[in-house]
Amino acid sequence: MGHITIDEDGEFCSCGNRGCLKVYASGSAIMERVRTALKKGVTSSLAALADRQLTIEAIMAAGREGDRLSQNVFPEAGTHLGTALADLVNLLNPQKIILGGVVPQIAQQLLIDPLLVSLRQRAFHQSVGDLELVVSQRGEETAAVGATLLAAERVLETVLKP
């Protein structure tokens, strides 16, 4: 999903495409946004951290303490994520979306509301009405666990087939 294009003329992604969601809403993208803002002289309590100490957790902690830069980067990422999810909802009409990874888990309070606003603005009303959105507590392991469960289900279907 990280390579869904959300801005055709956007920044370059490591995959060679432009405007991928990963460039705007991943943990590394959020940290890069903070680094860029700090280099431009934006005032933030994060300026005291050495570049190698800048983490999603540190950015979120600064946001909880009132740091404006930190409080702005997560909602921006949430808006971009909502835009990409709207495309998936319009295409697949899922009943449930499970957000995995560290960013939704740690920054849920700053990420989810802007995500839902963007999703509701862009997705078909009938598709988003009963949609359940949850944040996985598995963090980085979510995708691997989900893929493993799908593979196991397929194997069991084959083995147990009459």
Image (tube, rainbow, N blue to C red):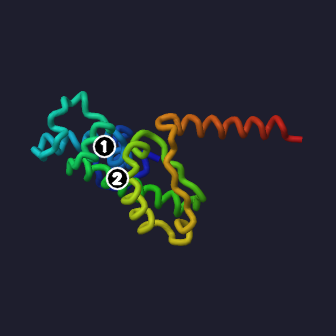
Q: How many marks?
A: 2
Q: Residue at x 49, y 48 (%)?
A: 135
Q: Residue at x 42, y 46 (%)?
A: 104
* Residue depicted at 59% across the width and 58% down the height: 94
Q: Are marks 2 and 1 in contact (CB under 8 Å)?
A: yes
Q: Secondary structure at mark 2?
A: helix
- Relative depth, front residue between 145 and 1: 145
* Quadrant in which the C terminus is drawn: top right
Amino acid at the residue labelled 1: Met
CA–CA distance in space, label 2 to label 1: 9 Å
Of mark 2 and mark 1, the one earlier in the sequence is 1
Closest to the observer, 107 or 101:
107
Rendered residue at 22%/43% (across/down): 34
Q: Residue furthest bottom?
A: 125
- Is 85 located above or below residue 59 in the figure? below
Q: Amino acid at mark 2?
A: Leu
Q: Position of residue 141 (x, y in %)?
A: 51, 34
Q: Which residue is mark 2?
A: 110
Image-quadrant location for residue 33: top left
Q: Position of residue 32 (x, y in %)?
A: 25, 40
Q: Which residue is mark 1?
A: 60
**Furthest-front residue in view?**
65
